[in-house]
Each structure stands twice: as structure tokens, then as C-alpha cells.
Image (tube, helix red, strand yellow):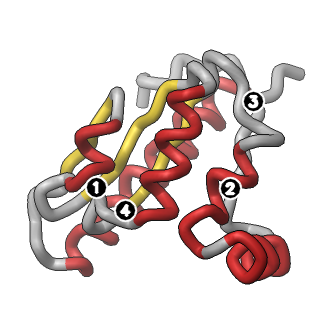
């Protein structure tokens, strides 16, 4: 069976707190990527404001390793929108609306990958 290398950088809470305490909150995602990201990978980030330093540093590191970056952002997109190869902007200043839209997009992505793994046409209904 084919597999995708998909992982969440915020699932391991003890790792996040250790990295944040030792290296700074702004480095907690970029530090993890140093062991994970490879050229040609795609980093998908979510940021309501597009200004989160931890997200920005992760994006910068991924790009320095020849990975592509997709950003799901809100408000005006912020720095994350500028750095992204693909920007999905929820043009709202309401965090609830932005987070709900990001959640819907996340569900669509999960279904897409699930169907790809099952060798189905991912866009047919």
C-alpha cells in the first residue's frame, strides 16, 4: 500500500513545551523540521493572522530546504501569505470565521489524501 509522509508538528505536547522552553516559542516548529523536511516536501501552515513568529520561522526554514509552502491564513495574510508558494486567504478579521474555514479546508485535504491512498479519483463524488 502506498503511504504519504504526513505529520502534525503540534501533536507532541511534551516536545513542544521542551523546545519552547529551551529554544524559544518562535523556534518550536522550525526546530522539528530540521529532522523532517526534505526537498520537494510541502509544508502546510495555518495562521489566523499570518504573523505568528513560530509559523514564519518554519516557513523560512522549509523554503531554505527547497520545500514548498502552502499557507492557510486570515485577515490580510500577513508575512505568511507573502512567503507562501500557495496562499489560501480567508478574507475576514473574525478569528472564528477564519478557524472554521481552515477546519473545512483541512477536512477536504484529509478526504483528498484518503481517496488518493485508496486509488480512487480524488475529485469524483
Which mark sits nearer the N-terminus, 1 or 3? 3
Quarter location, residue 91: bottom left
The local secondary structure at tag 4 comes to: strand
**Residue 32 shown left or right of residue 93 in the figure:** right
Question: Which numbered dot is residue 101?
Answer: none
Between marks 1 and 2, how big is the CA–CA gap? 17 Å
Task: Tell me if 2 is positioned left or right of 67 in this view.
Answer: right
Q: Residue at x 71, y 45 (%)?
A: 33
Q: Earlier in the sequence, mark 4 or mark 3?
A: 3
Marks 4 and 2, how far apart at CA: 14 Å
Q: Quadrant of residue 111?
A: top right
Residue 85 x %, y %:
35, 27
Query: What is the C-alpha distance between the residues marked 2 and 3?
Result: 13 Å
Q: Is residue 67 above or below residue 91?
A: above
Q: Nearer the viewer, residue 24 or 16?
A: 24
Q: Which residue is mark 3?
A: 4
N-term-proximal mark, 4 vs 2: 2
Q: Position of residue 53 (x, y in %)?
A: 43, 64
**Above or below — where is 66 with respect to 63?**
above
The first of marks 1 and 2 along the sequence is: 2
Give the residue at the far right of this rendering. 1
Q: What is the spatial separation of the Cα atoms under label 4 and label 1, in whole angstroms?
A: 5 Å
- How far apart marks 4 and 3 lie (CA) works out to 23 Å
Q: Position of residue 63 (x, y in %)?
A: 51, 29
72 and 49: which is toward the camera: 49
Q: Which residue is mark 2?
A: 8
In the structure shown, which secondary structural element does the residue marked by tag 1 occupy?
strand
Q: Kindly report which numbered mark, 2 or 3, lies closer to the viewer in this rendering.
A: 2
Q: Which residue in the protein does label 4 denote?
A: 47
Q: Which mark is residue 73?
A: 1
Amino acid at each position: 500500500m502506498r503511504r504519504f509522509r504526513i505529520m502534525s508538528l503540534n501533536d507532541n505536547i511534551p516536545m513542544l513545551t521542551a523546545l519552547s522552553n529551551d529554544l524559544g516559542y518562535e523556534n518550536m516548529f522550525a526546530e522539528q523540521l530540521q529532522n523532517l523536511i526534505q526537498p520537494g516536501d510541502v509544508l502546510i501552515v495555518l495562521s489566523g493572522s499570518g504573523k505568528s513568529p513560530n509559523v514564519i520561522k518554519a516557513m523560512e526554514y522549509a523554503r531554505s530546504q527547497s520545500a514548498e509552502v502552502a499557507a492557510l491564513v486570515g485577515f490580510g495574510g500577513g508575512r505568511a501569505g507573502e512567503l507562501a508558494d500557495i496562499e489560501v486567504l480567508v478574507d475576514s478579521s473574525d478569528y472564528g470565521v477564519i478557524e472554521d474555514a481552515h477546519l473545512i479546508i483541512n477536512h477536504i485535504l484529509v478526504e483528498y489524501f484518503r481517496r488518493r491512498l485508496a486509488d480512487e479519483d480524488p475529485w469524483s463524488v
